[in-house]
């Protein structure tokens, strides 16, 4: 995945990469799948006004017959994504964990969970999805449900808690959930008919209640720590560690703390608790690890070029930090790699 090429959404000054759905759009254009969807913004489908179905960013389904030669890229969404596989088989990956979805599986992913369908290609099947924005981008933020949600306050509070305190992505649907998604698909197909929005809102409320009942039956353990501020910092540091495009951004402590929605003092405290290093120190460690891998993987590239591309803005500073971290110069490190 190339994060810089994807659309983004913002929460304050924080920037988040989201799915462009290009492979899906191409598959529809080439007749490989049949798709029906209602959408806002960049998602594929029939565009609807942003004031209609508040919070619903995308809802739809596709039919994929036979083996497919495409899959979705790893992505995040600006909302909870709920998918239901009505028929078929589908490989699914969340935060580097692979699951094999079967008919009757439904999935729930939060905005901070990186996920994709296809390894690398999707399987045959009829897949439904809903992306519902509840106003959160980080685990510790409070959820704000759209006004059309009609669950009584106690049930809505229980559903919110269950979704926040458990990040298990794959569940087993019930006959009621399957029937609700079939009803939603008919609302999408007949969107221009009278009263379609009201019918869809009724189905969506039934879906939320059905999910609450399924989670109540299947969920064995809740973990309140998943909504902590420390969890938010942990997810950010994991991105810095795993994604070179994130680590090479022009970070300051203020920007990193702001990205996590907290002050510098709290952010620095959680950072040291998690990785036993201050924010800038840990950022440089990650950049050095990326640089080290590139030094050996790309012999023709100049050391200065690699240093700049990994986020260092001075070659001498890079060389000093590299020697301190690895016990040798970048040139010697590369030479040793050739000898091994």
Image: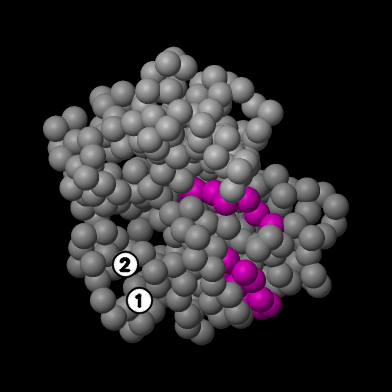
Residue at 18% from the left image edge and 30% from the top image edge: 264
Q: Is residue 176 above or below residue 238?
A: below
Residue 109 covered by magenta stretch: no
* Horizontal side of residue 301 vs 13, given as left or right: right
In depth, the one of 194 and 335 nearer the eye is 335
Residue at 45% from the left image edge and 28% from the top image edge: 329
Which disc number belongs to residue 5? none
Category of crowding for the residue at label 1, using alpha-carbon neighbours closer than 10 angstroms: few (below 14), some (14–19), many (at least 20): some
Residue that numbered label 2 is attached to: 166
Quadrant housing residue 202: bottom left
Mark 2 vs 1: CB contact within 8 A = yes
Residue that numbered label 1 is attached to: 215
Q: Position of residue 167 (x, y in %)?
A: 36, 64
Q: Position of residue 82 (x, y in %)?
A: 49, 63
* Horizontal side of residue 176 vs 7, given as left or right: left
Magenta-highlighted residues? 71-92
- Tag 1 secondary structure: helix
- Which comes before the other along the chain, label 2 or label 1? 2
Q: Is residue 213 visible?
A: no
Q: Position of residue 247 (x, y in %)?
A: 43, 34
- Tag 2 secondary structure: loop
Image quadrant containing the N terminus? top right
Quadrant housing residue 186: bottom right
Q: Position of residue 189 (x, y in %)?
A: 68, 60
């Amino acid at each position: 995945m190339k994060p810089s090429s994807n659309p983004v959404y913002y929460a304050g000054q924080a920037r988040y990469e989201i799915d462009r759905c290009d492979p899906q759009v191409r598959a529809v254009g080439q007749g490989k799948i049949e798709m029906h969807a209602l959408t806002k913004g960049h998602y594929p489908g029939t565009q609807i006004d942003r004031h209609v179905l508040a919070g619903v960013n995308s809802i739809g389904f596709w039919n994929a017959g036979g083996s497919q030669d495409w899959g979705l890229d790893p992505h995040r969404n600006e909302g909870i994504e709920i998918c239901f596989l009505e028929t078929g088989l589908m490989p699914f990956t969340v935060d580097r964990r692979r699951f094999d979805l079967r008919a009757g599986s439904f999935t729930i992913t939060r905005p901070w969970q990186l996920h994709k369908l296809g390894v690398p290609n999707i399987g045959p099947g009829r897949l439904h999805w809903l992306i519902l924005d509840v106003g959160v981008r980080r685990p510790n933020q409070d959820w704000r449900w759209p006004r059309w949600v009609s669950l009584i306050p106690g049930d809505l509070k229980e559903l919110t808690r269950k979704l926040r305190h458990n990040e298990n992505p794959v569940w087993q649907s019930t006959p009621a959930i399957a029937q609700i998604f079939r009803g939603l698909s008919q609302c999408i197909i007949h969107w221009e008919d009278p009263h379609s929005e009201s019918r869809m809102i009724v189905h969506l409320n039934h879906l939320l209640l059905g999910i609450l009942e399924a989670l109540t039956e299947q969920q064995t353990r809740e973990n309140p720590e998943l909504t902590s501020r420390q969890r938010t910092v942990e997810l950010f540091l994991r991105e810095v560690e795993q994604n070179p495009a994130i680590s090479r951004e022009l970070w300051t402590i203020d920007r990193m703390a702001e990205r996590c929605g907290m002050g510098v003092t709290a952010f620095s405290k959680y950072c040291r608790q998690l990785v036993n290093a201050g924010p800038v120190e840990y950022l440089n460690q990650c950049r050095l690890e990326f640089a080290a891998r590139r030094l050996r993987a790309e012999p023709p590239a100049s050391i200065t070029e690699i240093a700049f591309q990994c986020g260092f803005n001075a070659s001498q500073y890079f060389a000093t930090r590299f020697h301190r971290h690895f016990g040798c110069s970048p040139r010697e490190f590369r030479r040793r790699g050739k000898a091994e």
